[in-house]
Amino acid sequence: SQTIHQWPATLVQPVGSPLSLECTVEGTSNPNLYWYRQAAGRGLQLLFYSVGIGQISSEVPQNLSASRPQDRQFILSSKKLLLSDSGFYLCAWRTVSYEQYFGPGTRLTVT
Amino acid sequence: SQQGEEDPQALSIQEGENATMNCSYKTSINNLQWYRQNSGRGLVHLILIRSNEREKHSGRLRVTLDTSKKSSSLLITASRAADTASYFCATVLYSTLTFGKGTMLLVSP
């Protein structure tokens, strides 16, 4: 069965510091992968999605970037964090019928 | 902009009661999905209903879809304290899935 991992689970970083969040998927090949951000009490905002290695689509202009160096690895990065980057970051993969399966998430607090 | 909008934003009921949440959307869809999110956790896929379906059941869950009104409802029957969570609808059009802001359900023992 498919499993999706995210780490770290929580992160506290100062403003201006770099960021790297990792997501890996097991049990499926060539998955479509997604990064979402969820602000407190809000819905999910799609940040990036990837249909394959090296293929990244950005949904909103922002301080973040994404990369897909391997088939089942999806990385979210920032060179310099802003206070507004705080939130709950979720990685997901989708099935052929567009059901999405989410990782446990990373709680990022920028101080 | 968000495609799905859930109503109510928050719902508080007693164990054993039924909980109904609604979702309205603005454009055509291929399918509509419901997800649950426990506090501080990732979302869990509950059920998918296709645009040509009107009703679907899964255990204590019943989902309806009215494409003429662009709305869907999620009914949880005989609720339990463990059903306490946020519930999100998500619409799919072609390859895009868009989430609403969710309904927070509190089920008290």
Image (tube, coloured by chain):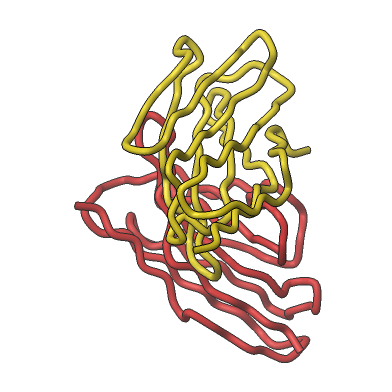
In the image, is A110 to the left or to the right of A68? right
Residue A16 lies in what quarter of the image? bottom right
Closest to the observer, A35 or B31: B31
| Residue B4 in sight in this render | yes
Residue at 42% x, 62% y is A103
In the image, is A66 to the left or to the right of A69? right
Closest to the observer, B20 or B39: B20
Where is B20 relative to A47, above or below? above
In the image, is A99 to the left or to the right of A3? right
Residue at 68% x, 34% y is B4
Counting from the top left corner in percent of width and height, residue B37 is at 51, 57
Counting from the top left corner in percent of width and height, residue A30 is at 31, 45
Counting from the top left corner in percent of width and height, residue A52 is at 41, 46
| Residue A47 in sight in this render | no
Quarter of the picture containing the N terminus of chain B is top right
Residue at 66% x, 74% y is A78
Residue at 51% x, 40% y is B18
Closest to the observer, A86 or A59: A86
Q: How many numbered tags mark residues here?
A: 0
Chain in yellow, by letter, is B
In the image, is A89 to the left or to the right of A75? right
Q: Colour of chain A?
A: red
Counting from the top left corner in percent of width and height, residue B107 is at 54, 57
